[in-house]
Amino acid sequence: MSSDRSTMRAVEFSVSIPGFLMARSLGRYSEIATFGPLGGLRLRELVEPPLPAEDWASLEILGCGICGTDLANLTFRSSPILEPFASFPAVLGHEILARVLEVGPGVRRVAPGDRVAVDPMLACRVRGYPEGTGCPSCSDGRHATCERAGEEGQLEISGEPLRRGLTIGYHRDLPGGWGERMIAHESQLFPLPDELSHRAGVLVEPLAIGLHAILNAPPDPGDDVLVIGSGPIAFATIWALRATGFDGAIVAQTRREPEGTLARALGASDVVRPGDEARDALVSTGAAAYQPILGDEVFAGGGFPMVIDCVGSKASIAQALRFTRPRGRVVLLGCAAEFRRLDLTLLWARELDVRGFVGYGTERWQGEELHTFEIVTRLLMESPAPVERMVTHVFPLAQYRAALSAAANRRRSEAVKVVLTPGPGGLPTDQSWGREGVYPGR
């Protein structure tokens, strides 16, 4: 392992009370208060962290997506309930495509030059705990809910215990993908075939979110499924349904025409807009509308057997509860937080089964135990679906504010997945991201 510690450019986010007050008060008027230094976000020169153990690797970032969770945290709109499981300041970015630069002598899974998708979730093994001593979640292959996320790890970096944290991208000691380089434990690295494009490779992490939910809460054969959402997780869910062989109807609720076109390309049977079109789709299942004395109309006599909410807003959750038939299933993939006056009456009155999913882990697939990333990679190689079209915008790292603005203002930019890359001019020389759909910045 090299003893040199060079510097690197990275977008770092600092959490502070002044930054919170600035974002919540002025953020509605100016993005400088959220996506700029007033909100605690800066492009900085940082010291590259050393490899802390023999089974770690150093990586060169090729590209990293901007997630809706990132936007919610930068604008301080997310719930503070998970704050104890993060540490700041942190280099953001957890949807990571990278190339291996250097490996410790104990690394066996990858070699320098390999292109990899990075699992950003921190398992007990990554925290330095020996195999066989993991928490119940990690021992069960469900490290996305690691129960030691609020503790310091046994691993040391630069002589200090690994700080608390659930995931790379919100961790003080482990830089995320909005930079030039990073480090990761070998168990987090999943080699990608050369045939897979950069645009598909950078989507492995968000695609795994949708796939993890479908593998653990599969719809019954022939059932109709309603997918609510116009973002990457909704598209990942539609793709996962079809890629795993589901042949029932998939109704995609999207807001804009380009999103509906993409939903159809990925496998949606029908596309509806929120409001009257979605109501008509519900009525077509045999539902009849009833108007209470106060509030929105409710329905009986029909409904969707499964509704997958990929938004996580008060309105989308309320819709999911109203649109699901009795004893049907609601799957929450959007990052639902705290809401005032959310009516949960139909949850018990219809005996609904509500499940939430986060991350990925060890799955059973075709008689094997595989990581979700491995299954995603296999399905990407087998499926003809044009998932690369989800990557609509690619920005160089220096234009991170323009990238965040595009991701946050999708009606204006028509963005689906926005990617940051430190490559020359935003386009790595070893494999072009392609010019189509590249947003020039402002």
Image: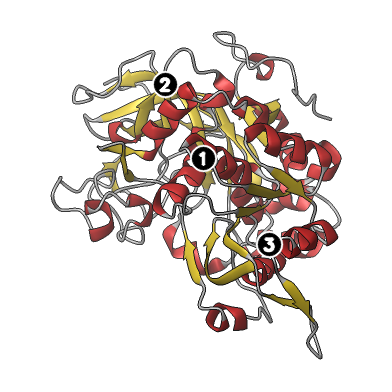
Give how far apart the Cα atoms at labels 3 and 2 are.
42 Å
Kindly identify the amino acid type of the residue bearing the numbered disc 1: Ala
Q: Which residue is mark 1?
A: 240
Numbered disc in front, either 3 or 1: 3
Which quadrant would residue 106 be assigned to in this image?
A: top left
Element carrying mark 2: loop
Q: Residues within 10 Å of mark 1 (few under 14, many from 20)?
A: many
> x, y percentage for residue 7?
49, 26
Judge whether 321 appears above or below 101 on screen: below
Element carrying mark 3: loop
Mark number for residue 285? 3
Element carrying mark 1: helix
Closer to the camera, 78 or 314? 314
Q: Which residue is mark 2?
A: 192
Numbered disc in front, either 1 or 2: 1
Earlier-in-chain disc, 3 versus 1:
1
Of the 4 image quadrants, the one containing the N terminus is: top left
Judge whether 182 appears above or below 343 on screen: above
> x, y percentage for residue 284?
73, 60
Viewed as shown, does residue 421 lie left or right of 379? right
